[in-house]
Amino acid sequence: MLKDFAISIIRTLREHGHKAYLVGGCVRDLLLGREPADYDVATDATPEEVMRIFPETYAVGAQFGVVLVPLPERDVALNCRDVTCYVSPKANVVEVATFRSDIGYSDGRHPDQVRFSKDPQEDVERRDFTINGLLLDPVTNEVLDFVGGRKDLGAGIIRSIGDPERRFAEDKLRMLRAVRFAARFGYTIEPGTFQAIQKTASQIDQVSRERVRDELTRMLIEGHARQAFLLLDESGLLREVLPEIEAMKGVEQPPQFHPEGDVFVHTLLLLERLPHPCPITLAWGALLHDVGKPATFRVAPDRIRFDGHVDVGVKIAEEICHRLRFSNDDTDQILALVDNHMRFAHVQQMKESTFKRFVRMPRFDEHLQLHRMDCEASHGNLTSYNFTREKTASMPPAAMRPVPLITGDDLIAIGYRPGPQFKKILSAVEDGQLEGRLQTKNEAIAFVGTEFPSAG
C-alpha cells in the first residue's frame, strides 16, 4: 500500500519534469528481501515545487528540503493493520526530500546551511552509511550506487559514507544507528567506522535525550537486543547512555539461582528472549529489572545477596525514565515491572485475595512474560510461571473482579462517618469476597460491624 503510493509520487514528479527515486532504508530493505517500514523519495524538485504538485502535504522540514506527503485517508486504516504501524511513526506518510548538500553542523545535528542540488550523487554523499545510500528507480528497477552500498550489503558491513568522524560530527546519533543496524542485520561495523565511534562516543550527550531513548528502544524491540547491547558496550557508548547497565558487568550472582553468570550476562540473556514485536514497556522493564543489584551486592555467610535490590532498582529506573523523557504512562508500567518481578516467587503461598489483586494489575501479561524470561535466563524453573498461568486461566473474570457487596453509601446508611477509614473497610470487604468468605451484602455488613465497630 505505502510502496505503491511512494511509486505514484515518483511517477507524478517525473510527469512534471523532475528526477525522483526511492532512497535510503527502503531500498536497502527491498534489496535484502525485507518489507520496508517506510518509504522515502529523493528528488531534484524543491520543497515549494513538491508542495505545488502535492497540495496535501506537511512542510515539517522544508528548510532542509523535507516534505511529508500523507497517504490518502481512505488508505490509512488499511495500512495501519500492518505491523509497520507498530514500529514506524512514518507508516502513513512518504518523506519527499530534495537533493542537497549540507554545509556545517554546529549543533551536531542540523546543517548550518543547506544547498539544494540537481545531482543525486551529491545528495547521497552527505548521508550516513553506504547501505543507506542507495537509490532505486522503481519503474526500471535500476539501482544507483555511488558509494559501494551494494557491495557492503553483500559483505554484511556497516560503513560510513566518506570520513566517519565527519559523518558522526554531523549527527552524533549516527553512532547509535550504526550499532542498531549492525545488530539488526547481523553485520559487522567496518573498523574505521567503529574506531570513530569509540573516539567520539563521549559526545553522544549532545544528542537530545528523546532521540537517544527512541534509538535505544528500537534496539530493544527489533529482535536483536542482546547483540545491540554487546556492541554498545564494546563501542564505549553504553557507559555514556546507560551507565547503570554497564555497572552490572562483573557483579556476581549466587550460582544456585544464577548459573549463567553475572548480572550483565543475565540481563543480556533475558533481552535475547524478548518477543518480536515487543511492547516498549516490557523491553525496558526487562532491561532494568535488576538495575538495583550492583548497588546492593554483598557476600553473606550463606551466599551472595542483593537485599532491597527491588526498591533500589525502582528508584534507579525512575531516574532513567525521567532522564530519557519517557511518558508518565510508560514510566508507571516500567517501574511496576521492576517493582513486582520478584513477587512471583511467592505466588503459591499468597492468600487468595493477594493473588487475585496481583494478577489483575494493569497489563499483567507483561509481568508474566518478564517472569518467564527471567527464569529462562537463569535457573530455568518455571514452576511459579506455570502455577500463575494455570490458576489465572481457571478463574472466571467475576472471581477476580467481583461486583462490590457494599459501597461507601452503604457504610453511611448504617451509621459510619465518611473518612480515610472507608478505603480500609471496603478493601477488607473485597478481600473477604476474593477469598470466598463473604457472599452477600448482609454478610458484608455483619463483617464490617464486627471488624470495624469503632469506625461507626
Image: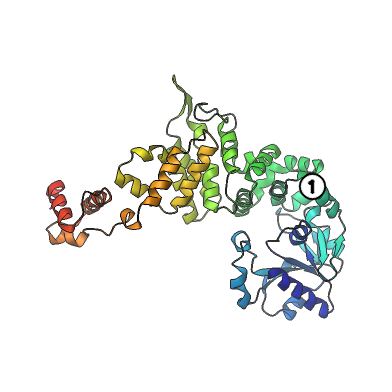
Quick one: 416 or 223, which is closer to the camera?
223
Regarding residue 24, the answer to whether it shows in the image is yes
Instruction: Quarter of the image for the N terminus: give it.
Output: bottom right
What residue is disc 1 on?
156
Query: Residue shown at 24%/49% (left/top)?
Result: 436
Disc 1 is placed on an element classified as: loop
Q: Residues within 10 Å of mark 1 (few under 14, many from 20)?
A: some
Residue 431 percent location from the top left of the image? 26, 49
Residue 278, given in percent of the width and then of the height, sits at 57, 52
On screen, residue 153 above or below 40: above
**What residue sits 66% from the left and 44% below the top?**
228
385 vs 39, left or right, is left
Check the image and report above or below for 94 versus 397: below
Q: Quadrant of residue 7?
A: bottom right
Residue type highlighted by circle 1: Gly
User: Is residue 325 shown to the viewer in this render?
Assistant: no
Question: Residue 144: image x %, image y %?
Answer: 86, 62
Say above or below: 72 vs 137: below
